[in-house]
């Protein structure tokens, strides 16, 4: 390819849509490109290779994925455009139909080959590296050197999902659950610790399934115990867990170790059992509530969050009211609220009773008001209390960061506290977090 022929160090631009897993994988691409001598440049400027790591969870994400592909194809007609991620996996025909020169498409099961594919000379007109993701049994091992500009590091321990919720395209885009070998997880964690990170977020598509496909089978609690045994001045956060996958053994680790931070995000999706059945979710509201209440009893300072999907096909006003009432009763710290987005290829896309957009908007607004109330109430509990805070950024004499239990905090501090975990007394609530006082000399 002429761009490569004319430059010893090809310029590579990477952009990422979607989840923490995609962000981790893009960081792995950046690591591998740098190790092979490529120069990483902003996606907004000229490059010889453009990598777009796409998302397909919502229609909006799919549209943004298409927009970024078009943008890359227009920006440099001689550049190599490589499209990967969930939208590339499930909608390769749509990507090829965008017009102009066809991009190279690398499926989720081949992401560990992406950098070598992108750097190849003499690319053909039509390049598809998709494979049958449904038959994939090997997780793509993607080592990461670091996350420039971030104080928290992600560590992908698992990929894929076996659950097939009726609204979700992810199992079709990511394939079955596959776990990264514990030895590789520990090696990656050690690399991040040695690079100076103070917090590692364990992430995956469905990490509660971690280890079930290993030989011999294992589980998430066993992996977390081994990570905690690494030592070092590092704390671990778990990105998201289904309610049925929060075992007593795992809770014991949360209680015993302050380095496993008291924060659990537990997807709910609906507070009405009829909607949960239509969603093909594997629990009832009573079971979910029991888990949340058990966590709140054993970890009273924990931030417990929930995902809620609003306007699922057939969701009646009565069912929505049941969701609101159910959420208001739970000891939750916050909600992530999303309107249902119709995704072709899923069971829910063909269901009757698609909820009008205006109704969805009104329901989303109502639950987001509840989210604000929950956040305020949770923060108010900690006024006057001292919490460890990881300082993520500093500006004009003020440090900003997150407490172990997921409260954003701003407090006066010197610049040299960046990337440090310090003790802060939380003194007042504000709209987006809390104000605090740094307890100088206390680590």
Image (tube, grey):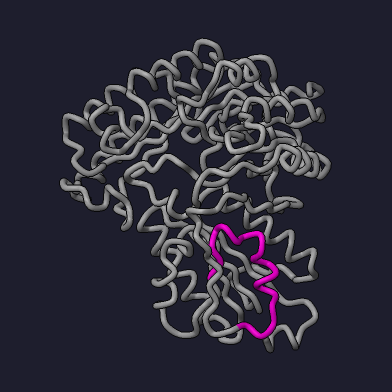
The magenta stretch is 105-123
Residue shown at the point (36%, 36%) measured from the top left: 308
Residue 286 in the figure: left or right of residue 145: left
418 to 294, vertically: above or below: below
Q: Quadrant of residue 237?
A: top right
User: Where residue 336 appears, x then y in whole percent?
Assistant: 42, 37
- Magenta residue check for 443: no
Q: Which image quadrant: the C terminus?
A: top right
Q: Quadrant of residue 324?
A: top left
Q: Identify the residue at horizontal 57%, vertical 58% (top origin).
A: 109
Query: In x, y percent, where is residue 130?
Result: 52, 65
Residue 119 belongs to the span the image colors magenta: yes
Question: Is 95 in front, or is 150?
Answer: 95
Expressed as whole percent of the image width and height from the top left, the position of residue 317 reads: 16, 34
Q: Is residue 180 left or right of residue 355?
A: right
Q: Nearer the viewer, residue 369 or 104?
A: 104
Image quadrant occupied by the N terminus: bottom right
x%, y% of residue 411? 65, 32
State whether residue 415 appears in this view: no
In the image, what residue occupies the spot 75% across and 88% down?
A: 6
Q: Which residue appears farthest toward the top when viewing the image?
A: 297
Which residue is more in the foreground, 70 or 122? 122
Looking at the rendering, which quadrant does residue 51 occupy? bottom right
Is residue 235 left or right of 301 when viewed as pictured? Answer: right
């Amino acid at each position: 390819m002429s761009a490569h022929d004319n430059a010893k160090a090809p310029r590579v631009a990477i952009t990422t849509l979607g989840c923490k897993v995609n962000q981790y994988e893009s960081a792995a691409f950046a690591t591998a490109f740098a190790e092979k001598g490529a120069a990483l440049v902003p996606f907004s400027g000229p490059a010889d290779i453009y990598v777009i790591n796409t998302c397909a969870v919502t229609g909006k994400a799919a549209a943004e994925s298409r927009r970024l592909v078009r943008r890359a194809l227009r920006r440099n007609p001689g550049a190599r455009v490589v499209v990967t991620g969930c939208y590339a996996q499930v909608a390769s025909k749509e990507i090829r139909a965008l017009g102009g020169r066809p991009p190279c498409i690398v499926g989720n099961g081949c992401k560990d080959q992406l950098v070598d594919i992108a750097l190849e000379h003499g690319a053909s007109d039509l390049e598809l590296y998709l494979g049958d993701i449904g038959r994939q049994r090997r997780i793509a091992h993607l080592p990461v050197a670091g996350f420039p500009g971030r104080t928290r590091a992600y560590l992908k321990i698992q990929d894929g999902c076996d659950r097939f919720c009726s609204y979700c395209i992810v199992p079709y885009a990511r394939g079955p659950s596959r776990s990264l070998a514990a030895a590789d997880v520990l090696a990656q964690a050690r690399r991040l610790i040695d690079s100076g990170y103070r917090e590692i977020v364990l992430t995956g598509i469905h990490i509660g399934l971690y280890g079930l496909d290993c030989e011999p089978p294992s589980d998430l609690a066993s992996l977390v115990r081994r990570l905690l045994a690494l030592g070092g001045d590092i704390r671990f956060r778990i990105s998201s867990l289904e309610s049925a996958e929060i075992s007593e053994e795992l809770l014991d680790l949360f209680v015993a170790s302050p380095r496993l931070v008291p924060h659990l995000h537990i997807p709910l999706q609906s507070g009405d059992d009829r909607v949960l059945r239509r969603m093909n979710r594997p629990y009832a509201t009573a079971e979910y509530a029991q888990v949340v209440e058990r966590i709140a009893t054993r970890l009273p300072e924990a931030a417990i969050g929930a995902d809620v999907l609003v306007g699922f096909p057939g969701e009646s006003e009565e069912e929505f009211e049941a969701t609101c009432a159910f959420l208001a009763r739970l000891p939750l710290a916050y909600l992530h609220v999303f309107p249902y987005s119709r995704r072709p290829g899923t069971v829910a896309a063909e269901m009757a009773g698609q909820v009008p957009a205006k109704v969805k908007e009104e329901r989303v607004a109502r639950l987001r008001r509840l989210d604000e109330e929950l956040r305020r109430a949770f923060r108010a509990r900690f006024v006057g209390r001292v919490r460890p805070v990881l300082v993520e950024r500093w500006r004009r004499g003020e440090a900003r960061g997150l407490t172990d239990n997921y409260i954003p905090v701003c407090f006066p501090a010197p610049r040299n506290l960046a990337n440090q975990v310090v003790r802060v007394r939380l003194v007042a609530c504000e709209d987006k977090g809390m104000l605090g006082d740094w307890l100088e000399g206390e680590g």
